[in-house]
Image: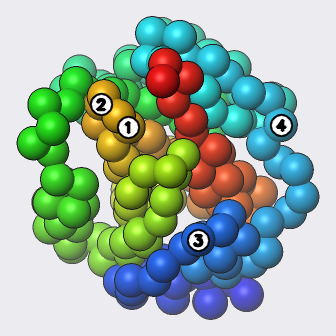
Amino acid sequence: MKKIFLLLCLFPTLALADSYDAAVMDICGTHPKGDAVTKELNITPLGLTIKVPDNFTKMPDLLADIKYPSLKNKPKFIYSNGDGAVSLGLTEKASSGLVDIDVIKDGMLDLVKALKPKALPLTVDGNKAWLVVFKSQARDGNILNIQLFTMTDTKFVVGTFNMTDKYINQYCDVGVLSLMSLKETSR
């Protein structure tokens, strides 16, 4: 099972995901494990809601500064499990209508091409979106990165769900389901 998961993460593929189950199967190699994302967070400053596991809380600023030392790459809102080894980050940027989500996805794939990323097109809250998945190195070991790029009616949104190797079996499907639950509230 682990070899299948690694193969799915290491070789780039394109597939169309119209459902949570299809996206989880494509990225994690398993069916989703029930209702793992039950707590809905209302991110009022972004005009977004997203579902997360019950044990996620706002990441303390000190831990966020360690995990994201570059202010340029630090999400505006970060939530995590107790030890911070699994986290969700959200950032939005105003859209002038000139953002092409496919160009953003291609740029990200090019940026991390040495990490053999995988891209999955899908629809999130009625909007075209991409999940980009890759493994990277960090201080605390290998990290599985699941990134969401989408446009709402008014903004470009980036969501990231990261986990260390230790938590992949427990949180891979959770990360996909959480990111796919993103909804705009300010319509």
How packed mark 3 is, by other alpha carbons closer than 10 Å (few <14, some 14-19, many 20 or more), is: few
- Specify few, some or many for label 1: CA neighbours under 10 Å numbering under 14, 14-19, or 20 or more: many
Inter-mark Cα distance, 3 to 4:
21 Å
On the image, numbered disc 3 is attached to which residue? 18
Residue appearing at x 33%, y 43% in the figure: 151
Mark 2 and mark 1 in contact (Cβ < 8 Å)?
yes
**Along the polypeptide, which appears first: circle 4 or circle 2?**
4
Which quadrant of the view contains residue 71? top left
At x 55% / y 17%, what residue is drawn? 43
Q: Judge by depth and name the residue closer to the eye, 103 or 175.
A: 103
Residue 70 seen from this side: no
Label 4, secondary structure: give it.
Answer: loop
Which comes before the other along the chain, label 3 or label 4? 3
Q: Amino acid at mark 4?
A: Thr
Mark 3–mark 2 Cα distance, whole angstroms, equals 22 Å
Q: Are marks 4 and 1 in contact (CB under 8 Å)?
A: no
Task: Indicate the secondary structure of the residue bearing disc 1.
Answer: loop
Label 2, residues with CA under 10 Å away: few <14, some 14-19, many ≥20: some
Disc 2 marks a residue whose amino acid type is Lys
Which residue has dot 4 on it? 38
Q: Which residue is mark 1?
A: 152
CA separation in Å, label 4 and label 1: 23 Å
Q: Nearer the viewer, residue 173 or 170?
A: 173
The kind of secondary structure element at disc 2 is strand
Give the residue number, with chain letter if any, for mark 2: 155
Q: Position of residue 183 (x, y in %)?
A: 56, 35
Q: Earlier in the sequence, mark 4 or mark 1?
A: 4
Residue drawn at 77 percent across, 37 percent down: 53
Residue 37 on image: x %, y %: 78, 42
Residue nearest the viewer, comparing 143 with 89: 89
Above or below, comparing residue 119 to residue 43 in the picture:
below
